[in-house]
Image (cartoon, coloured by chain):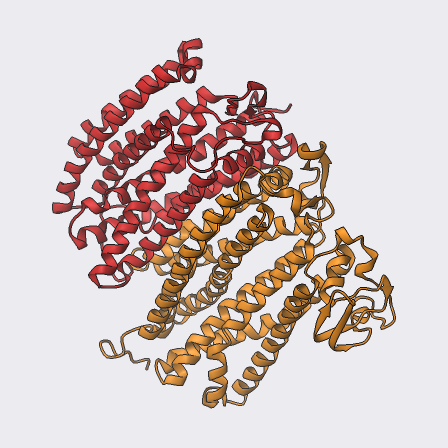
């Protein structure tokens, strides 16, 4: 295999693995802030137990997130040297801001969050929890800004020729608020919060089904369900707004997402299907003209299709992009349905008696994870063949001085260590969850 | 070219990165150093105390690497890209040991089984040692220069060329320096028999450092004298090596008087001064091309635009006081000897 493909596989693998953890930390972070605020407000023991339990889970997700994140930062330089020189002027300042404003905040307060329960006053601890949560939210800001700039560059000009060419900032705020950054940031945040909220839902649904920690689990479930319902509904808005942006700024990506080939014709909106690149046909169930309606509020409005782009400027994996995009949407809709239904049952006071629903929630934790992953795959594969949209091709961006053997070596190393890490992560989570927030035999807790 | 306080932007950014790397070396120096001593502590309780000595702070200390790397990427993208792709294998190993070390800290005390703890103890200690060593190795390679050609293309060996005698020596010196730093930090955080044991280990560490440092210095003067050219041209700079020597000499004296905070300060100062030596020697070059000096990567041809550097200096001016505040709060909270409780590892 050639160096470019290997470098892409390695980056995709390491970033996809990394992205299991930070969303969980962001989502759990928000739930922890709510739980601890309630503890300070009500002084009730159950909120203290919940907060401290989720701090322990958070410690695991956060730790692995940091460890695997540092690899990403350096991989730009090791494997994408041409890209790094090209975007350093722009990407670099976002990364530096991320380190200083976001990681500094979250990591310094993390020590107090994890180890400071007996050392600082309760309100100081709450401030630390909030600090860590804000830090993790800010880190999403800068990395999504940097990635969005690659999708929709703004506030820059190109200097130099050939291998010496690079983008330089002309307007910092135009770079930060580039056309897609805010939509994508909100969408990413919401995806992250859902990942964390569904983990909380899953764990406490499991306890409720087993009849363990029933009192506190009801409280935790209600908190997480409220968050999950609001966020999965509003996720629809940011998703729609994001897609509108793609229609304007990255028409080739939009066309790939719906498998739309004709140069200028009304485009359909599929629920599911498969794309055949050869015959340029989609087989599946769709609403004729649906995409046209979503973009232009008119079923007959023409949408620019893939054939209006030169072959070399089209994304390669049309069917994969189509599938990833549609899986994300299907899951998003599923989450809305699930949370609304659960909220209705809560209102009817039947939520905790409906065992099958709790069963569904125990396993639904996987859904936001899948949606986050495939969403990013669609976004990144849809940007191809560009690494910086319209300016720098992926095939020009990798480090040519690095040999295929070197990448195979590091890829094998990453695979082994990450496999170990994933096993450990699942083992520790399972252990912590099985053990529960406190030992029921040793320290029976009464909440009266 | 734009100036601030009479210094041009690339030079300012060079100073910022120098400060960030010094901060990283000082703070993670004691983290890695403590890890390097781990297997020298025999009892399980001692090892738990040692891990909990760094547990609340190591994540925050690691931020200096994240910021340092980001600052290098932002300020000197050419340097960042060229160095990382040229030093591919050592950096990949460095990253891998970082992951392993983080896992070891988190998971070591999570299970009671002897085999579990022993395996993690090995993983923790070996990865700490390797990280310190690899950082030194990279520094050693930077001091010697790389075969860099046109368009900043590295054309040297792929797999093992980074393991040359000089780089290995700098690697051991860095490890010894970190181990000294780590022993002092642990002395500050421990009591009783563990403390006595560490007093003994600190002496070994100092000895290791003096031997490694003397060998590296001699090798430098004999085999790569051009590394010291700046100092011979400009005698005033000799103040840096003299000061670093005085700072090192102060460490055992203060340690024997049990003034560990001061000892830690002086060993940190040693690190900062040694890095200053490197920085003075290299300036304004970042990467020396062994093919032709015209291919050198300097702070001027590697720098981002003036506009970008200006933005980032503003970010640093706003961010640094915030960061200092966070760190003050963190270290103040965990001041004093390690106390194990139900939140400890």
Seen in the picture, residue B80 relative to B216 is either above or below; the reply is below
Q: Out of A434 and A43, give the one closest to the viewer.
A: A434
Q: Residue A118 versus residue A311: which sits nearer the camera?
A: A311
Give the image location of residue A432, x and y in percent.
34, 69
Output the letter for the chain in red: B
Q: In which quadrant of the rendered image does the C terminus of chain A lie?
A: bottom left
Residue A55 seen in the current view: no
Instruction: Report the residue at 28% width, 62% height from top.
Output: B110
Q: Position of residue A1 (x, y in %)?
A: 57, 50
Where is A175 relative to A229, above or below?
A: above
Task: Name the colour assigned to chain A in the rendering.
Answer: orange
* Residue drawn at the location 44% of the way across and 14% of the way down: B230
Q: Nearer the viewer, residue A429 or B326?
A: A429
The residue at the far front in this view is A1
Residue B265: x and y in percent read 30, 32
Task: Tell me, yes or no, if residue B235 can be seen here.
Answer: yes
Judge from the rendering whether residue B31 lies leftward or rightward of residue A182; answer left or right: left
Q: Where is residue A334 in the image (x, y as percent from the top left)?
A: 60, 77
B135 vs B145, left or right, is: left
| Tally of numbered discs | 0
What residue sits 45% from the left and 52% below the top? A412
Q: In which quarter of the image is residue B129?
A: top left
């Amino acid at each position: 295999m050639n160096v470019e493909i290997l470098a892409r596989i390695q980056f995709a693998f390491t970033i996809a693995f990394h992205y299991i953890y930070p969303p969980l930390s962001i989502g759990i972070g928000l739930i922890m802030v709510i739980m601890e605020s309630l503890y300070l407000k009500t002084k009730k023991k159950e909120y203290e137990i919940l907060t401290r339990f989720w701090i322990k889970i958070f410690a695991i997700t956060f730790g692995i997130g940091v460890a695997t994140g540092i690899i990403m930062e350096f991989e730009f330089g090791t494997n994408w040297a041409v890209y790094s020189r090209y975007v350093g002027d722009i990407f670099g300042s976002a990364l530096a801001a991320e380190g200083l404003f976001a990681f500094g905040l979250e990591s310094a307060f993390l020590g107090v969050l994890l180890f400071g329960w007996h050392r600082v006053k309760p309100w100081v601890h709450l401030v630390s929890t909030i600090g860590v949560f804000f830090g993790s939210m800010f880190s999403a800001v800068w990395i999504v800004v940097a990635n969005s700039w690659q999708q929709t560059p703004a506030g820059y000009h190109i200097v130099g020729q050939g291998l010496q060419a690079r983008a330089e900032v002309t307007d910092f705020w135009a770079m930060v608020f580039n056309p897609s950054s805010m939509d994508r940031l909100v969408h990413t945040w919401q995806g992250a919060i859902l990942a964390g909220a569904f983990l909380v839902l899953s764990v406490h649904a499991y306890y409720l089904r087993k009849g363990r920690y029933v009192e506190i689990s009801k409280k935790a479930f209600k908190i997480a369900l409220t968050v999950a319902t609001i966020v999965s509904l509003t996720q629809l808005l940011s998703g729609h707004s994001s897609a509108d942006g793609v229609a304007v700024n990255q028409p080739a990506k939009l066309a790939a997402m719906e498998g739309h080939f004709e140069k200028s014709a009304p485009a359909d909106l599929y629920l599911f299907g498969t794309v055949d690149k050869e015959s340029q046909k989609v087989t599946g169930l769709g609403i004729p003209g649906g995409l046209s309606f979503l973009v232009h509020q008119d079923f007959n409005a023409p949408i620019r299709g893939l054939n209006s782009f030169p072959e070399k400027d089209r994304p390669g994996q049309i069917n994969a992009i189509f599938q990833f995009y549609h899986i994300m949407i299907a899951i998003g809709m599923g989450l809305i349905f699930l949370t609304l239904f659960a909220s209705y049952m809560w209102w009817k006071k039947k939520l905790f008696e409906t065992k099958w629903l709790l069963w569904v929630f125990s396993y639904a934790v996987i859904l936001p994870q899948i949606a986050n992953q495939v969403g990013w795959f669609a976004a990144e594969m849809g940007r191809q063949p560009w690494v910086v949209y319209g300016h720098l091709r992926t095939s020009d961006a990798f480090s040519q001085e690095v040999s295929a053997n070197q990448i195979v070596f590091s890829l094998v190393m990453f695979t082994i260590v990450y496999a170990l890490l994933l096993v450990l992560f699942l083992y520790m989570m399972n252990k912590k969850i099985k053990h529960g927030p406190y030992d029921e035999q040793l320290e029976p807790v009464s909440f009266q | 070219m734009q100036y601030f306080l009479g210094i041009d932007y690339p030079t300012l950014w060079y100073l910022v990165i120098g400060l960030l790397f010094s901060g990283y070396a000082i703070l993670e120096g004691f983290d890695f150093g403590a890890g390097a001593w781990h297997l020298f502590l025999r009892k399980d309780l001692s090892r738990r105390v040692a891990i909990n000595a760094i547990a609340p702070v190591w994540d925050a200390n690691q931020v200096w690497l994240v910021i340092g790397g980001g600052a290098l990427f932002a300020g000197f993208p050419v340097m960042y890209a060229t160095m990382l792709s040229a030093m591919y294998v050592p950096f990949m190993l460095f990253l891998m040991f970082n992951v392993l070390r983080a896992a070891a800290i988190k998971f070591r005390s999570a299970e009671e089984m002897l085999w579990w703890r022993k395996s993690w103890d090995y993983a923790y200690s070996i990865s700490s040692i390797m990280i310190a060593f690899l950082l030194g190795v990279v520094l050693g390679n930077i001091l010697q220069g790389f075969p860099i050609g046109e368009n900043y293309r590295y054309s040297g060996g792929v797999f093992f060329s980074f393991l040359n005698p000089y780089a290995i020596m700098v690697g051991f010196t860095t490890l010894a320096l970190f181990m000294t730093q780590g022993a002092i930090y642990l002395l500050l955080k421990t009591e009783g028999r563990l403390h006595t044991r560490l007093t003994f280990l600190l002496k070994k560490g100092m000895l290791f450092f003096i031997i490694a440092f003397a060998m590296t210095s001699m090798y430098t003067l004999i085999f790569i004298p051009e590394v010291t050219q700046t100092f011979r041209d400009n005698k005033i700079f000799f103040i840096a090596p003299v000061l670093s020597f005085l700072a090192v000499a102060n460490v055992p004296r203060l340690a024997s008087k049990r003034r560990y905070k001061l000892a830690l300060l002086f060993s940190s100062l040693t690190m900062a001064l040694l890095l200053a030596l490197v920085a003075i020697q290299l300036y304004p070059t970042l990467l020396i091309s062994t093919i032709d000096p015209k291919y050198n990567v300097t702070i001027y041809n590697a720098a981002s635009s003036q506009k970008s550097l200006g933005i980032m200096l503003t970010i640093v001016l706003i961010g640094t006081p915030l960061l200092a505040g966070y760190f003050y709060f963190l270290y103040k909270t965990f001041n004093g000897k390690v106390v194990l409780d139900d939140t400890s590892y």
